[in-house]
Image: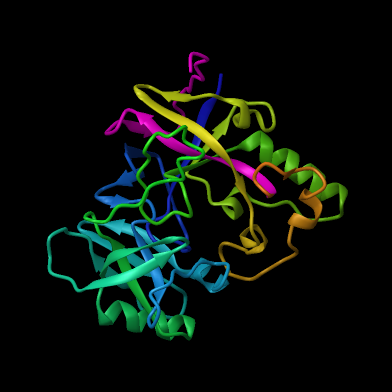
Amino acid sequence: MPVLASLHLYPVKGCRGISLPEATLDAQGLEHQGVGDREWMIVDAASGRFETQRSLPALARIATSIEQDGLVLQAAGTRALRIDTRRGRPREGRTITVWRHTGPALDEGDEAAAWLSALLGRALRLVRWDPASRRIADPQWTDGMEASVRFPDGFPLLVAASPSLAQVNRWLAAAGRRPLSMDRFRPNLVIDGLAPFEEEHLPDIACGAARIRPVKPCTRCGVPSIDQLTGERGPDPLDVLEHYRMDPGVGGVTFGMNAIVVAGIGERLRVGQRLHAPRDR
C-alpha cells in the first residue's frame, strides 16, 4: 500500500523548503498557516524576471520558516528577514515574468530587496503572488482541465517516490558517484511503497477525499547538482541519468511527476497517510 512519506512546502521559489507533518491542499498546491507553495519569488530588480537556483545556486542557502503572521528567511552570517504574511496590507504592484507568464505581483518592499541584494550580490526584489493574477498550467498535459498555479515552473504539485530515488542512486553508485538526497529534486509529496518509477503510471492518487493527478514527467535541469544546504554545485547527475531516464516525449531527463489537484480542496494531507491509486479515470 502506498504511503505519504513526507510533505514539503517551498514558500519562496528557489529557496530552501520546509518539511511538514501535515499541510492543506488548495487549488494551487500545498498551503500551511496561510503560506502557499511558491507564493513568493525573487526577481531581477530591473527586468522583473524570475530567479532560481539555475541562475543563483546560493538561493539554496536561504532557509524559510513560518511563524504567526510571518514568513522568516534566514542565511548564515546575516540577520533574519521577517515578511508579514497578512493579506490586505498596502504593497506596490510590480510586473514580473516567470517563464512565458508576465503579469502583476505584489512587491515586498525595500527592506526585503536590500536583504536579498546584499546576500546574493545582485539587485533583486522579493514579490508575492497577486491573487488577482491568473496563471494556468499547460492544458496540453491536463486534458484541458484548468489548473491554477502560483510561481512553480509549471504545475501545482511535484510528486516523487522514495524507491525511484533509490534506483537513481544505484545507477549513480555504479558510475562511481555519491548518492543524492531527495531534497535535490524539490518535491512536494514523497511517496513510499511503490515500485521504482511506478508513480509515472498512476492515473490518480487519492489521499482521503483529496485526489491528485500526475500529468507530466518532470524534466530535470542542473538543480539536482546543487547541495541544498550549502548552495555549492557538485557533479551533475544528468550525464549518468540520461542513459536511463531520457524521455523524448518531454525532451529531457525526467524524475518525478508534475501533478494537478482534481478534488479535495481544503483537505489536510498527513505524513504516514495511506494512499490509493484508483483505476477509474
In the drawing, does residue 135 fall left or right of residue 243?
left
Q: Nearer the viewer, residue 5 or 96?
A: 96
Q: Position of residue 102 (x, y in %)?
A: 37, 64
Q: Nearer the viewer, residue 146 or 258?
A: 146
* Colour style of the rendered protein structure: rainbow
Q: Residue at x 18, y 71 (%)?
A: 91
Picture quarter containing residue 85? bottom left
Q: Quadrant of the N terminus?
A: top right
Q: Residue at x 28, y 65 (%)?
A: 105
Q: Residue at x 30, y 52 (%)?
A: 134
Q: Residue at x 74, y 38 (%)?
A: 167
| 83 shown above or below 221 | below
Q: Position of residue 68 (x, y in %)?
A: 21, 56
Q: Position of residue 177 (x, y in %)?
A: 81, 56
Q: Is residue 258 on the magenta stretch?
A: yes
Q: Nearer the viewer, residue 72 or 249?
A: 249
> Which residue occupies the extreme top position in the image?
280
User: What range of the chain is rendered magenta?
Assistant: 252-281
